Image (cartoon, rainbow, N blue to C red):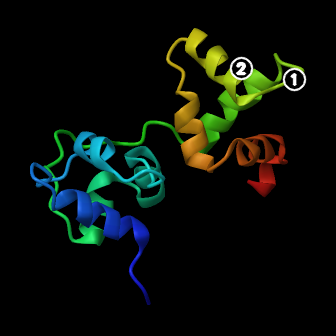
């Protein structure tokens, strides 16, 4: 199997002066035009450390451990509450609505959990036994 373009780009940037250990900031400042952003790599890989490890690139130790706070059902509850208030839902309006709600997750958290806005809507509108 051939080399993944993301792995090659991570290694290229890490080899630059100041690129080791590779940080998200350094990568985004030096990635090639058209290469995936660090945020997109993290979304696909699960974490920056996992992406770098898969590419054989050294990265900084994590400053903190992330624990998922929201279950899929919690997130769907927020989306369903939003859908009940908006006859023409959109990702942008969901994001604005969530910012107005106390202790709500971010729209990015919801989209990252389900993959796409369309997938969020499909999951929120599916009968409970189909989730």
Give residue 117's position: percent from left, percent from top: 70, 41
In this view, 104 is above or below 125: above
Relative horizontal placement of residue 9, taking residue 62 as reference (left or right): right
Label 1 or label 2, whichever comes before in sequence order: 1
Give residue 14's position: percent from left, percent from top: 19, 58
Residue behind mark 2: 93
Crowding at dot 1, Cα within 10 Å, few <14 / some 14-19 / many 20+, comes out as few
Give residue 103's position: percent from left, percent from top: 49, 17
Question: Which residue appears at 52% of the width and 36% of the height?
Answer: 109
Residue behind mark 1: 88
Distance Cα–Cα, label 1 vs label 2: 9 Å
In this view, 61 is above or below 107: below
In this view, 131 is above or below 96: below
In which quarter of the view is residue 35 placed? bottom left
Secondary element at image label 2: helix
Crowding at dot 2, Cα within 10 Å, few <14 / some 14-19 / many 20+, comes out as some
Task: Name the residue nearer the viewer: 10 or 109.
Answer: 10
Secondary element at image label 1: loop
Discs 1, 2 touching: Cβ within 8 Å: yes
Task: Name the residue nearer the viewer: 51 or 8.
Answer: 8
In which quarter of the view is residue 6 placed? bottom left
Relative horizontal placement of residue 116, taking residue 62 as reference (left or right): right
Q: Quadrant of the N terminus?
A: bottom left
Question: Which residue appears at 41% of the width and 42% of the height?
Answer: 68
In which quarter of the view is residue 54 placed? bottom left
Residue furthest to the front in view is 33
Relative horizontal placement of residue 67, taking residue 128 as reference (left or right): left
Question: Which residue appears at 42% of the width and 54% of the height?
Answer: 41
Task: Name the residue nearer the viewer: 34 or 102.
Answer: 34
């Amino acid at each position: 199997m051939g080399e993944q373009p993301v792995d090659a780009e991570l290694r290229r940037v890490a080899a630059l002066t100041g690129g080791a250990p590779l940080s998200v900031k350094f990568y985004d400042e030096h990635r090639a035009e058209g290469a995936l952003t660090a945020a997109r790599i993290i979304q696909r890989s699960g974490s920056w450390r996992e992406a770098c490890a898969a590419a054989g690139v050294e990265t900084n130790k994590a400053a903190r451990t992330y624990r998922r706070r929201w279950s899929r059902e919690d997130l769907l509850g927020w989306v369903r509450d939003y859908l009940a208030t908006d006859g023409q839902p959109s990702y942008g309006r969901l994001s604005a609505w969530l910012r107005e709600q106390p202790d709500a997750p971010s729209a990015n958290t919801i989209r990252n959990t389900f993959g796409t806005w369309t997938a969020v809507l499909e999951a929120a509108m599916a009968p409970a036994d189909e989730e």
